[in-house]
Amino acid sequence: MSRNENRKQIGKLLSHKRKERGYTLEQVAIKTGLSETNLMRIEEGRYNTGVDMLMNIINALETKILLE
């Protein structure tokens, strides 16, 4: 799987978890300190983020993500 495909897969999971929890992009942005635009880009797989920020988003969503 390419890096781009990995970003898209992770982004889809984050988007799904955010919507499942009923959070808006604005709410997650406030919790993480990221802009809504960058969060949207991460969810779309168009933004490369580090592990620390990824964990920050996951914690803000109060969830876990399993990668296969």
Image (tube, rainbow, N blue to C red):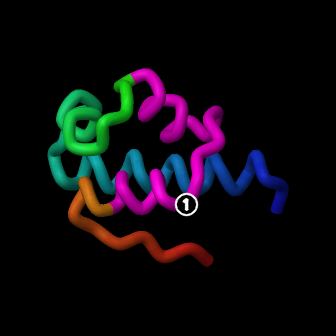
Q: Is residue 22 above or below residue 61?
A: above
Q: Is residue 18 magenta?
A: no
Which residue appears at 58% of the width and 53% of the height?
A: 50
Q: Is residue 12 left or right of residue 28?
A: right
Quadrant of res 23: top left
Q: Is residue 23 above or below residue 24?
A: below
**Where 33 falls versus 19 (above or below)?**
above
The N terminus appears in which quarter of the rendering? bottom right
Q: Label 1, secondary structure: give it.
A: helix
Judged by its main secondary structure, the magenta piece is helix
Residue marked by disc 1? 51
What amino acid does circle 1 point to? Val
In the rendered image, residue 43, in percent from the top left (x then y), is placed at 49, 40
- 18 sits to left or right of 44: left
Quadrant of the image containing the C terminus: bottom right
Residue stretch rendered in magenta on the structure: 37-58
Residue 28 is situated, as x and y percent measured from the top left of the image, at 25, 40
